[in-house]
Image: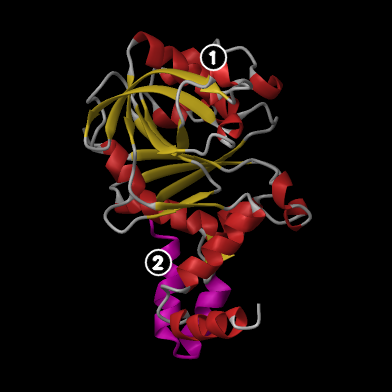
C-alpha cells in the first residue's frame, strides 16, 4: 500500500536536556550541519512521503522558519556566487508539503496525534517521533515499516530490543516471530513497573504506521501513565483485537532528547560526514591517547 502522509510530533518540552531547551527546540539541535528535524523529514521523504504535518507548541517557531524560504539569505548567497549553498538552502523548503499545527495543551503523545485527524483523513499514515533520528545503511526506517503494512493485523510498529534494566522507560510488547525481522504483536504495556508486567524486551522505538481508526480510539482513550493520553494505550486496543505487525528495523537510533544521545549522534555522524570525518577521526585518536 502506498502511504503518502506522515505526522511528526514535536511538541515536547525537552526537559531531559535543560537548560538548552528553555528557549530552543530540541528538534533543532544540529547534527554536524543539519538540525535533528531535517533528518527526520528527509527520512520520510526518501520513503515516498509527500505530505507532512509537524505538531509543535509555543516557542517552536524556529522549526517552521527552517522549512520556509529565506529570501534575504538566498539573495546574499546569490550575489556572492555561492551557488551550492543557495541550492542547498532552497531545497529545504522544497522537500515536501509541510504543514504545522500547535498542540495547545500538553496532554500526551496520544493527544498530539489526535490533532492530525483532519490532516490524515481516512487513510493510513506514518508517525516519526521528533526527537528520534535513525540512520540506516539500507533503506529509511519508516520505509521498512511501510513495506510490511497489513502483513499482520492493522498497523505497523518499529521495534528494537531494550535492556531489561531499561524496559520500564519504554513500552513492552507481546510478540510472536513470523519471519526474518517481522513479528506479530498482540499486546502492549506502557512503561511496565514490575517484572510481571513485562511482556518482552521488544519495545516501540520512534516509528509506526497507523490505520485511520486510531483517531476514533484516541477520542475515547482515558488518560494513562503520567495522567496523559498515551498513544500506546490506543494502539494496544488494535493489537489485542486485530493484531499489529512489528518490524525490527535496520538502523542506528539516536535519542536527541538525551544528553548522551546528542553526543553520540554528533560524533558518529561526524565520523561519516565527508567534510569532518578525517579531522574528527584524528582528533578522537589524539584525545583518546590522553584519557
> Is 145 one of the magenta-colored residues?
no
- Per the picture, the main secondary structure of the magenta-coloured stretch is helix
- Does 177 sit left or right of 24 as displayed? left
At label 1, counting other C-alpha atoms closer than 10 Å, the crowd grade (few under 14, some 14-19, many 20 or more) is: few
Please provide percent x and percent y for residue 213: 39, 17
Please provide percent x and percent y for residue 9: 54, 39
Mark seen at residue 185: none
Q: Nearer the viewer, residue 187 or 106?
A: 187
Q: Quadrant of the N terminus?
A: top left
At label 2, counting other C-alpha atoms closer than 10 Å, the crowd grade (few under 14, some 14-19, many 20 or more) is: few
Q: Residue at x 60, y 59 (%)?
A: 262
Q: Against 263, is 50 above or below? A: above
Please provide percent x and percent y for residue 261: 58, 55
Please provide percent x and percent y for residue 289: 60, 83
Query: Helix or strand or loop: what does disc 2 sit on?
Result: helix
Q: Residue at x 67, y 26 (%)?
A: 107
Q: Quadrant of the C terminus?
A: bottom right
The answer to whether residue 50 shows anywhere in this view is no
Q: Residue under circle 1?
A: 219
Magenta segment boundaries in residue numbering: 71-95
Q: Residue under circle 2?
A: 91
State how far apart marks 1 and 2 are (Cα): 37 Å
Quarter of the rendering containing residue 115: top right
Amino acid at each position: 500500500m502506498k502511504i503518502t502522509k506522515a505526522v511528526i510530533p514535536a511538541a515536547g518540552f525537552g526537559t531531559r536536556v535543560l537548560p538548552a531547551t528553555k528557549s530552543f527546540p530540541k528538534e533543532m539541535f544540529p547534527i554536524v550541519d543539519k538540525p535533528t528535524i531535517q533528518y527526520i523529514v528527509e527520512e520520510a521523504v526518501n520513503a515516498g512521503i509527500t505530505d507532512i504535518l509537524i505538531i509543535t507548541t509555543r516557542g517552536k517557531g524556529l522549526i517552521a522558519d527552517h522549512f520556509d524560504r529565506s529570501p534575504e539569505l538566498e539573495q546574499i548567497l546569490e550575489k556572492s556566487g555561492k551557488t551550492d549553498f543557495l541550492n542547498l538552502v532552497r531545497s529545504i523548503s522544497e522537500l515536501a508539503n509541510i504543514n504545522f499545527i500547535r498542540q495547545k495543551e500538553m496532554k500526551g503523545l496520544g493527544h498530539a496525534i489526535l490533532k492530525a485527524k483532519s490532516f490524515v483523513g481516512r487513510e493510513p499514515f506514518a508517525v516519526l517521533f521528533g526527537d528520534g533520528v535513525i540512520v540506516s545503511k539500507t533503506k529509511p526506517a519508516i520505509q521498512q515499516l511501510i513495506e510490511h503494512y497489513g502483513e499482520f493485523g492493522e498497523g505497523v510498529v518499529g521495534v528494537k530490543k531494550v535492556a531489561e534494566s531499561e524496559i520500564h522507560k519504554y513500552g513492552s510488547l507481546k510478540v510472536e516471530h513470523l519471519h526474518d525481522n517481522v513479528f506479530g504483536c498482540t499486546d502492549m504495556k506502557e512503561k511496565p513497573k514490575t517484572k510481571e508486567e513485562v511482556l518482552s524486551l521488544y519495545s516501540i522505538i520512534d516509528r509506526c504506521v497507523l490505520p485511520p481508526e486510531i483517531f476514533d480510539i484516541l477520542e475515547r482513550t482515558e488518560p494513562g501513565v503520567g495522567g496523559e493520553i498515551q498513544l500506546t494505550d490506543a494502539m494496544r486496543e488494535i493489537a489485542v483485537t486485530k493484531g499489529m505487525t512489528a518490524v525490527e528495523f535496520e538502523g542506528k537510533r539516536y535519542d536527541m532528547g538525551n544528553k548522551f544521545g546528542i553526543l553520540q549522534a554528533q560524533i558518529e555522524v561526524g565520523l561519516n560526514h565527508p567534510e569532518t570525518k578525517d579531522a574528527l577521526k584524528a582528533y578522537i585518536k589524539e584525545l583518546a591517547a590522553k584519557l
